Amino acid sequence: MKERRPSIKDVAQKANVSIATVSHVLNKTRYVSDETTQRVMNAMVEVNYHSNAVAKALRQNKTHTVGVIIPDIVNPFFSNLVNYIEMELNKFGYTVILCHSRDNLEQELACVKKLNSWSVDGIIIAPASPDYDYAELREREAQCPIVFVDRQPNTSNYNGVFFDIYRIFEEATAKLIDAGHRKIGFVHGPIRFSTTGDRLRGYESALALNGIPVDQKVIFCADTSIAGGYRAMEQLMSNTDMTAVIVANSRMCLGAMRYLGEKQVRIPEDLAIIGFETTEWADIVQPALTSIRETVDEMGISAAKLMMKILRDPDCEKQQIYLNPYLTKKTSY
């Protein structure tokens, strides 16, 4: 026979107080003396009482959970992003439920449906599709607010936290031009999302501002992997006379550096290079790699704080926050 679960009534009897007093201690809804609070806490331990979070959520119409949907759990950027979102939400007593869309819209929408069925209080999402009209999801925002991160959605009047990618790639390209380079290569992934397109447009803008025509021969698109970066650098070094290159993806940058190391290309004497969001290993390689860094901790914390602002005031004005990446000055250009 299944043993009966201890109830709040059992705690009240053990502590010799009313059920209402136990409730006030648990929910902090009214002042209870330290002596009585301690007596209730001791009674909870003695009867092995545990608060029923599901029942509490039903009473309050809040689960104190936030769903987070990311496109690539293997990508260190997104795993770090979830880490900072979770740490910040934990400060407010919220728990994260993590979902993985695998950059697939159908999977993403299934994640949203599942999170809604679990009655999460809100959803933070890095969109899996540049074309889907996310306004359809936003119609439900009164019940479950949404905060977009990193990639901008195909909708309007939304809440989100993003990086000013265009500006930093324009700045990085200008740095190479100021150093005397005119043949500057550019390696990027498939242009599906606003983030990739903004990187390329920033590069092209800096060239235009300095009177340098865009040369498609030194621009290479490959899959965002180490192998893709290796192949891109192999092609560019074999078929162009570029003197500098910007690699606009962290994993591609690893592949590019692997190729240059194997071919004993001297950096920056033979080729100047600026990488992207390469974190710790950029400081280990020789020479240390100049790279564009995104403050993923700032994005995670900002997204969590924006979500909490919306949960506290559902009628607050929509807000898009733009954070500034920065360029580390090492010795690779």
Image (tube, rainbow, N blue to C red):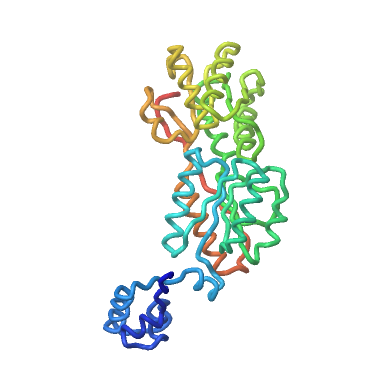
Quarter assignment of residue 288: top left
The residue depicted at 50 percent of the width and 54 percent of the height is 302
**Front residue (pair 55, 244):** 55
Residue 289: percent from the left, percent from the top?
A: 42, 27
Q: Quadrant of the C terminus?
A: top left
Percent of width and height locating residue 82: 48, 49
Left or right of 116: which side holds 256? left
Q: Is residue 20 left or right of residue 39?
A: right
Image: 214 above or below 318:
above
Quadrant for the N terminus, please: bottom left
Residue 247, compared with residue 34, is above or below; it is above
Residue farthest to the left, as pictured: 35
Could you say which is closer to the camera, residue 198 or residue 62? 62
Q: Position of residue 168 (x, y in %)?
A: 54, 37
Q: Name the residue at 60% across, 39% down.
A: 195
- Above or below for 97 versus 308: above
Residue in front for this viewpoint, 182 or 226: 226
Answer above or below: position of 224 versus 103.
above
Count of residue discs: 0
Residue at 59% x, 57% y is: 115
Give how far across and how far down residue 235 sits, in percent.
58, 15
- Taking the spot 34% from the left edge, 84% from the top edge, the residue there is 32
